[in-house]
Every structure is written in C-alpha cells, then in structure tokens.
Image: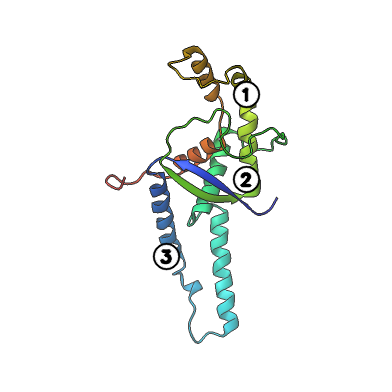
Amino acid sequence: MAGTAPIYLRITTGLRDRLVAHTAAEVARREELLQDPRWEITRDMPARKRAAIRGAARAYVAGLRERGELLDTQDVFMTHAVQAELRQRGWDHDWPPIPDNAPRSGRWPGSLDRGWAEKLTLSLPTALAERARAACFHTSADAIDKLRAWRDRHPEVVTEATAPTAYQEYMELARQVTTTGDLWRAALDNALPALPAGDE
C-alpha cells in the first residue's frame, strides 16, 4: 500500500513547540551535512556533473531520513516516532483486517474529552497508518464492544453526579481503549526531547 495518509491530532500545549524546535535543529544539521566537500558545486562544473552531485545529495538525505538518522521534517519525525511506539508496545506486526464496524474517523468509543489545546496535521505512509489503526482497534475491540453495549443501556447523559456507578463503569472501559489519537500523542511525546528550561 503506497502513498501517504493524513493524520489529525489534538495535542497538549507545548507539544507542537517541541516538534518545531526539534525539526528546526535537524534542518540546521542537514545544512551542516551538506557542507561536506563532496556535495560542493562550482560554477565551472559541467551541467551533467552538477546534476549528478545534486541527485547524489538528495539520495544521501533520503537515505538518512529512511534510516531515521535525519528527522528534518515533521512527517519524517512522526513516521519514525510511530514506528518506535508500535515496537515499544509490541504492536509492530501484521494485524487481522479491520472490520467494517471499526471506527473510521471522528471520536472513537471511549474517547475522553481532555480539552486538547492545539491541533496538528501530519502525514504517515499509508501502510504505517493502517497498521497503527489496526493495532489500536484490535487491542481495544473488547472494550469498544462493551462501550457500545453500555451506551445502549444508558442512552441518557451520564455524569459522575447523576449516576456514579454507571459513570465509573464507563470510565473503566474507556481506559481500556487506545485510540489512534492516544497512539499519535504518545509517539510524539515519547520521541521528542524536552525543551530546555526557560523555553517551555
């Protein structure tokens, strides 16, 4: 499955700043790497040689990005962050197909409104985005089914004040669901270094 898929994140304050700062540092590092004499182009070089050097430099940068040695765009950073998060959770493997009743977009059953302050849109390779989505669904499927049944039993608005037992039951089931948003936020937070003191 080729191509890229957009992902939409709601994130905590400061996470975007950490991503921007890290990416800017990587852009500066890329510029340093490209100061190597092997990538130097002079005015007196034949056009064919200039084109070959530019092509080799692009391939060099692409290889660094592919291996996770240069994370100079937000999308490249996110790709490696999600791969690392899946590995850390033991979810980096093939999953069964996602059934038609799986959440496709919008709020998943069990999504909790945490008042995310910022939004971020990134792109992932389609195969990676689908693997992450399948991992979230299959590890949460039992709780999602139980949440749907809970909603059938409680069509009214349930709060901790009006129905504490039902509310606690919902919250316990919700904690067993890992939404794609949960996964994206964890991937970013775990992969990004903290900002230096005074920059937050």
The three-letter code of the residue at mark 2 reads Leu
- Left or right: 128 as drawn, with respect to 200: right
As helix, strand or loop, the secondary structure at mark 2 comes to helix
Q: For the view shown, which residue lies furthest in the front direction? A: 156
Residue sitting at x 61%, y 28% = 140
Select label 3 or label 2 by which is in front: 2
Q: Nearer the viewer, residue 167 or 156?
A: 156
Q: CA distance from mark 3 to mark 2?
A: 30 Å
Residue ID for mark 3? 32
Q: Is residue 75 above or below residue 188?
A: below
The three-letter code of the residue at mark 1 reads Arg
- Left or right: 144 as drawn, with respect to 69: right
Q: Is residue 52 above or below residue 93?
A: below
Marked residue nearer the N-terminal end (1 or 2): 2
Residue sitting at x 68%, y 53% = 2
Residue ID for mark 1? 148
- Packing grade of label 3 (10 A; few <14, some 14-19, many >=20) is few
Residue 78 point in image, percent of width and height: 52, 48
Residue 148 point in image, percent of width and height: 62, 23
Select label 1 or label 2 by which is in front: 1
The three-letter code of the residue at mark 3 reads Glu
Total labels: the figure holds 3
Residue 128, numbered circle: 2
Residue 108, numbered circle: none
Q: Is residue 98 above or below residue 129?
A: above
Q: CA distance from mark 1 to mark 3?
A: 54 Å
